[in-house]
Amino acid sequence: MGSNHSSLWVAAGLLLAWLSFSVATSGQGSTSSPQNNGLTQMDGRQANNEITEAYLRQNQGDPKEDAAYLAFHKATEDSEKKVKLGNAFLAKYPSDRYSQAVYEELTQTYYDHKDLANFYAYSDKGLSLFPDDVHLLALRGWVIPRAFTSDEPDAEKNLDKAEADEKHALDVLGRMEKPPTLTDEQFSEFKTGETAVAHSGLGLVYFRREQYSESAKELQSAIQGEANPDATDIFILGADFENLKQFKDAADAFNRCAQIRGSMQDRCKQYASAASKQAGEAK
C-alpha cells in the first residue's frame, strides 16, 4: 500500500464485504447459533433484562398476561419458539405494557440470527409504536450502516434514517430519568452501553459518507473506556485516520485492532505495518 493510495482501498469494496459478513441475512426461524459481535460487548442488554425482570416481580397485572410474557422472555435457547410466543403475545395483547419489551426482544432475536428482513420489519413496527425506545433506535441505527451497500434502493435515505435514529437515541438518553426499579449501577450500565452503540452507529454512517473526521470522533466516543471494544470500530477508526493522512494514529488503531482475536486480526496486523511505514515516510 503506497502512500498515494491511502484512501483507495477504502472505496474498493473490501470493507463492504468485511462489514456485511456479521449481518448476512438468513431465513426466518434460523436455528443457527448467534455469532459473537461487537454489539454484545457494548449494548445495555443485561441491564435491559434486569429492568424487565424487576418489573415482572412487581406482579401488578393479569397473571395470565404476566405468564405469557414470562414464557416468551425465558425462551432464549429456541429462537423459533421465542418468535412464535412473541407473535402470539402481540396478537393477544397488542398494546400491553409488555409490548415494547416484546418488540425489543423479537428484533434482537432476528438480529442475532442474521434475519435482516424481519429485523427491519419488527424494529420499524416497534418504533412506530414506541418512538423513544432507546434500544430499538440504537440497534437499528447501528445495523443499517453495517449492512449498507451503495447500490441498494434508497441507500442514502437509509443512512439518513440511521443517523436520525442514533441522534434521537442520544437525545432520549440525555433526558432519561432513572426508573425506581433500577439501581444507580444498573441505570449507568444501561446508559453507557446504549450510548456506545449510538456513537458506533454514527461513526459507521459518517464513514460510509466518507466524512472521515466526523467518523473518527464518533468512534473514539464509542470505544472510550471500553475494556473489550468492537474490532470493527477500531478498524474503521484506523481507516478514518489513514484517509485523514494521520498515519501514526492509523497505525495505533490498527495495532489495537490486531490485539483482538478474531477474523480481522491478521488483516489488522497488515494494515498496522503499512500505516507505520507510511508514518515513517511522512516524517
Image (cartoon, rainbow, N blue to C red):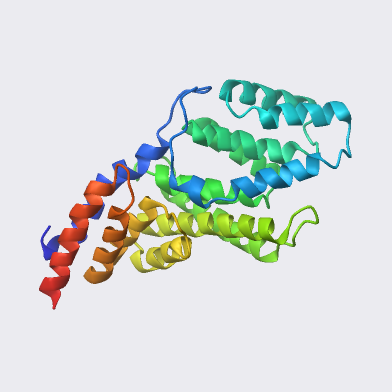
Looking at the picture, does residue 69 appear above or below residue 269?
above
Report if residue 245 is visible in the image. no
Question: Which residue is pictured at 19% across the width and 63% down the height?
Answer: 275
Residue at 10% over, 61% down: 2
- Residue 262: image x %, image y %? 32, 43
Q: Who is closer to the viewer here, 172 or 261?
A: 261
Residue 144 shows in the view: yes
Relative depth, front residue between 129 and 42:
42
Residue 204: x and y in percent read 41, 55
Looking at the image, residue 56 sits to the left or right of residue 137; the answer is right
State the image coordinates of residue 257 (x, y, percent, origin top left): 31, 55
In-image side of 24 versus 111 (left or right):
left
For the N terminus, the image quarter is bottom left
Number of numbered labels in the structure image:
0
Q: Give residue 150's quadrant in the image.
A: top left
Q: Nearer the viewer, residue 128 or 178?
A: 178
Nearer to the camera, 123 or 227: 227
- The structure residue drawn at horizontal position 63% and vertical position 25%, both measured from the top left corner, is 82
User: Which residue of the protein is positioned furthest toward the bottom in this rendering?
Assistant: 283
Report the residue at 68% width, 52% height from top. 132
Question: Viewed as shown, does residue 226 lie left or right of 100?
Answer: left
| Image quarter of the C terminus | bottom left
Q: Position of residue 13 (x, y in %)?
A: 25, 45
